[in-house]
Image (spheres, coloured by chain):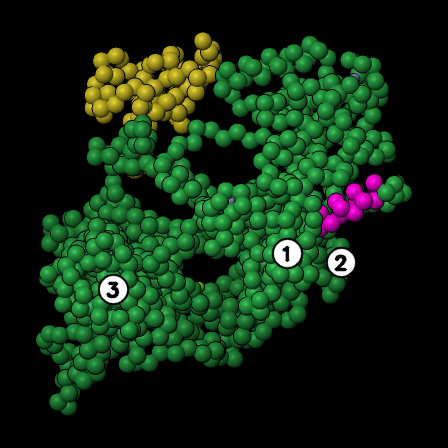
Chain colours: A yellow, B green
Amino acid sequence: MPKPFKFDVLKHEFVPRHEIMSEEEVEELQEEYDISKEQLPRILNTDPGALSVRARPGDVLRITRKSDTAGQATAYRLCVEASDA
Amino acid sequence: MRNVASTPKKIGDIQFGLLGPQEIRSMSATKIITADTYDDDGFPIEMGLMDPRLGVIEPGLRCKTCGNTVGDCPGHFGHIDLAMPVIHVGYNWMIRNILRSTCRNCGRMLATDSEIEDYHATMEEWRTQNRDVWELIKKTIKKETRGKSGHECVHCGEIQKKVEFDKPSTYREEGHKLTPVDIREWLERVRPEEAELLGLNPDVAKPEWMVLTVMPVPPVTMRPSITLESGERSEDDLTHKLVDVLRINQRLQENRDAGAPQLIVEDLWELLQYHITTCIDNESSGIPPARHRSGRPLKTLSQRLKGKEGRFRQNLSGKRVNFSARTVISPDPNISINDVGVPEASALELTVPLNVTPYNIDVAREFVKNGPKEHPGANYVVRPDGRRLKVTELNAENLALRLEPGYTIERHLVDGDIVLFNRQPSLHRMSIMAHEVRVMPAKTFRINLSVCPPYNADFDGDEMNLHVLQSEEARAEAKILMRVQEHILSPRFGGPIVGGIHDEVSGGFVLTHKHKHYAKKEALDILSRARFQSELPEPDKVEDGTEYFTGKQIFSLLLPSDLNLKYRSEICPHKDCDPWDPETGEGCEFDGYVVVEDGELVAGTIDEKSIGAFQGEFINRIIRRHGASFTREFIDRMTRLVLGAIMHDGFSTAIDDEDIPAQAQQQIDDNVQEARDNVEDLIRQFEEGELEQMPGRGLEETLELKIMQELGEARDQAGKIAGEHLGMENPSVIMARSGARGSMLNLSQMAGVVGQQAVRGERITRGYEDRTLSHFERGDLGADAKGFVESSYKDGLSPTEFFFHSMGGREGLVDTAVRTARSGYMQRRLINALEDLRVEYDGTVRNTVGTVIQFMYGEDGIDPTKSHRGKPVNVTQIVSDVVGETAEDEPVEQVDEDAYDSQDAELMRSLQDEMDIQNPDDFEGAE
Ligand SMILES: [Mg+2]
Ligand SMILES: [Zn+2]
Ligand SMILES: [Zn+2]
Ligand SMILES: [Zn+2]
C-alpha cells in the first residue's frame, strides 16, 4: 500500500475535489451510463489525488473540477493498482 | 496462386530470422555461375542471372521450375557460392556488439557465469511479464560492450584486445585486421544461449550467418528486364549489381585457385565485399555508392524499401485512386459556392455508373450513342453477366441499340453530379467538401472565391483533387453531410468560415460607405450581376427626373426582411460613437456603426466584419435564422453584387497611394531625428553611469529597453503622421481598413519608416566582434548600428538597413518553417490518438470498446459548430428578439491567428533559450 503524502494536495486550489463513491453511488453511475467498471477512465492508486483520499484499487472516485466551458464538470475514475496499469 | 489468394488467412505472428547457407541452397532453384545473361540469339543462359528456372517474365512462356505462366509464377531464388566469405552490411552493428562482448579465444560472453545466469533469469522473468525483451537486450549490450581490452577471460584466461570497427566493414584488433573468415570462426564459437542475451534468437539465427558464404539471388520477377523501343534490352539495377558480384567472385576464385599473390587476392576480396555491400544497401556510409553508366546511383535492395518513395510508404501504405482528377484551380465568382467547374477533358475521363432501367433507357442510349469522345457520352457498357465492353466511336451506335434494362453504363460526368473536392494539407473537415459539377471549357478546376478560406486555397498555382462518387449511398451521404453549404459554419470557432475575401470586401465598402448615389441605370446594372429579380425601393432622391438610389439601399435588397443588427465594424476605431447621419454628417465619421433594421441597412459600412470569412456577422446571423440553403444563396448573390459594385466604380491601387506631402515627410524626419538624439542621450547616460536601472532589469537591459521604446515610438509616430495624409478615399487605406488586404502598418512602412529590425525580440547584436557590421565602430550602441531602418520601403533601404532587414526577415521564415513542421507532427499525433473516438447519444465520448473518455462532450455537451463563437448561446440576440429592440452586439474576441503565431514564437524562443543555457554535461550528472 503506497503511503499518503504528509500534506493534503486536495487543499491546493488547482487540485480538483476527489471523493470515494459509495457502492450504491457506483451502481447508480453504472446504470446511468450503462457501463461496466472497467469502462471507466482510470486513476492510479499512487496518484497524489487518490492517495489523499486513501483510495484503494477497485474504488471509484468522483472528481469535481472547474470547467472553462461548463463551469463545473464531474468525472469518474476507477482506482487501479499502479503496477497493473 | 490466384486460387490460393482468394482464401482469407489470418497472420498469427511474424518471426524474423537469418538465412543460413543450407537454407539458401535448399530454396535455390539453381546455382548461378556465370555473369552472362543472354546468348547471341537472345535466349537466357543456363546458370546465368536470367536462368529460366528463376521464373518467367515473358508472356506465353512457362516457368521451368513451377510450370506456371507470367503472373502466376511467383519467381524462384537462385544462389551464388562465394569464393570467400563476406560480411553482411545490415548486421555490422550486431557483429560489433558480439565481438566486443565475447572472448576472442573461447567465444564465451565475458561476464562471469553467475552474471550470465542472472541475465537469463531476468530475461525469463520479463518474458513471463510480457515486457519488451528488446529493452533488456539493449541494456545488456550496453553493459557488456564496455571496454574489454587488457582484461582476462573468466572462462579461459585469454587476454582480450580492443575491437575497433571502421566503416563500412573493417574490423581490427589493436591494428591487426580481422578477415571475414576470422570473424566467422569467432562467431561460430559463440554459444547460442549467450547470443540470445545479445539479441539473436537461437531458433532462427546463428551468429556466423551474419557473414555470408552463399548469397541468394533474387528471382527475375523482382528484377525484370525491359525491352526498349529500339529493341535493345535494358536490365534492372539489381541485375547489374549481381553481374558485378558474379564477375568479381569468379576472378577471386580463379586467382585464389591459381595461387596468386596474397595482395591480389585480398584486393579482389575487398572488391567482392564492396559489391555485395552495395547490392544490399547502396547508401551505407563510408563507401561511394555504385553508379550506373549514366552516373545515376543504382537502386539496390535497401533503396527499394526505404524512405518516402520506398515500397512501404509508396506502394503499401499509399494507394492510387480511380475516378479522381487533379489540376490547377482558378477563380470563378459567377458559380455558386456549392459548385466546382470541371474541365471538359476531365469530364470525358471521369465516369459515373448508371443502371439502365425502363425509365432511363432512352437517356442511357443517348449517352452511349455519343461515344467516348463527345461530351455527355459513355466510356463503358457493362452487361448483366459482368462483361465490360469499351465504347468506341465505331461501336457506339450498335452498343446503344443493344442496351437493355439490367445493363450498366459508365457515363461521363455531367452538370449536377456530386463529387468530393479536396486540397492538401487536409487539416480539418472542411478540407474535403462535396461540390456539384459544372462542366466547363479550358483546363482548370474553377471554384467560387468564398470557398477559398476553408480550403486555404489561392490561385498562385494551387492544385486540388476531385473524386467522383460511384454509388447512390455515397452521393446521398455526401450531399447531406459534405456539401459546402453545410460547412459555412466552422466547428473551430462557431462562426462562418465561408465568406467574402479581398475585392469582395473592398466592394462591400465601395458600395455602402456613406451615402453614395447610383442612378437607376447604374443601380440596375449592379443588381443584375447579382441576378436580382424584384421591385426597386423608393429612390433616395430624384434629380432632373433621374431616380437615385444609395449603395446602402442596393445592398439592402439582398437582406432578409427580418434581419436586425447593431455593431461596430472593423473600420470604426471608436468605442462610443453614434451611427453616422447622412443629413447632418454627425456620428461616426468613418460610418463604422452598422445598423440594420428589418432588413434595411440604415447606417454603417460593409467590411470584413460584416461579410468576410471568419467574421461575417451578416452570414452568421442569417445562417442561424434561415439555414444553409438560404445562406448559400445569400453569399452567392451578395458576393456577385459587391463585385458588381467594385467593377462599376473601378478600384485600383498603385505606389502613389503611399505618397505623402513633403511637409509630412519633413515632420517624420524631424521626429526620427529627435528619437535619435534621445537614443544618443540614453547611451551617454549609460556610459556616464547616470542611467537609472529599471526594477528587475540589468543596466544594459534597461538601456536596450529604453532605446527600443524610443525607436518604437518614433516608428509609431511616423505611421501616425503618414496615416493622417492617407485618407479614407485612398484605395490602399480602404483595403487596409476594411480588412480586404494589408494593414495600416504595411502602409506606414511603405510611406513612413520601416522601423527597428529584431532577431529574437531584441535589437540586432550578432555579427562581428563588438559590432554588427564592419561599417560601424566597435561598441556602437546607436540606432543605425543595431538595425534601425529609417527609410521607407518606397524610398528604398540603405545597404546596411537592407542587411538588417534580411536578418529579421530570415527569422520570420525560419519560424514559419519550424512551426509548420512541428504543428503538422503534433496534429498527426493528435489525430491518431483521437481518430476513433465518438460522441454517443448519451453525450459521452467513448472509444471503440466503449470506455468513457469524457462523461459529457467538451464538459458542456455543446457542438462548437452551433455555438455562438464558442459560447453556448448568443444572449444579446435572444434578448433583442424577445424585447423587439436591437441591442448592440458585444464585441467578440477576434480570431486573431497572428496573435497565436506570435505567442507560439515567444514560447519557442524561451524554450530555445533554455536549451542554449543548459549544458549537456548537466544531464549526465542528473541521471
Ligand atoms: Mg498557393
Ligand atoms: Zn515458377
Ligand atoms: Zn575465453
Ligand atoms: Zn465609430
Magenta highlight range:
B244-257
Residue A30 in picture, x, y percent from top left? 24, 20
Q: Chain of mark 1?
A: B
Q: Is residue B816 left or right of residue B337?
A: right
Residue B529 in picture, x, y percent from top left? 22, 76
**Does any portion of residue B619 appear in the rendered image?**
no
**Image quadrant assignment for residue B327:** bottom left
Q: Is residue B389 left or right of residue B780?
A: left
Task: Name which residue lies at 67% across and 63% down.
Answer: B294
Q: Secondary structure at mark 3?
A: strand
Q: Chain of mark 3?
A: B
Return the mark for residue B38.
1
- Is B526 placed above or below B806 here? below
- Is B254 placed above or below B385 here? above
Callouts 3 and 1 in the same chain = yes
Residue B461 in picture, x, y percent from top left? 44, 67
Q: Earlier in the sequence, mark 3 or mark 2?
A: 3
Nearer to the camera, B503 or B111: B111
Q: Chain of mark 2?
A: B
Task: Name which residue lies at 39% across and 33% down.
Answer: B9
Q: Is residue B177 left or right of residue B525?
A: right
Where does label 3 land, which residue?
B411
Q: Secondary structure at mark 2?
A: loop
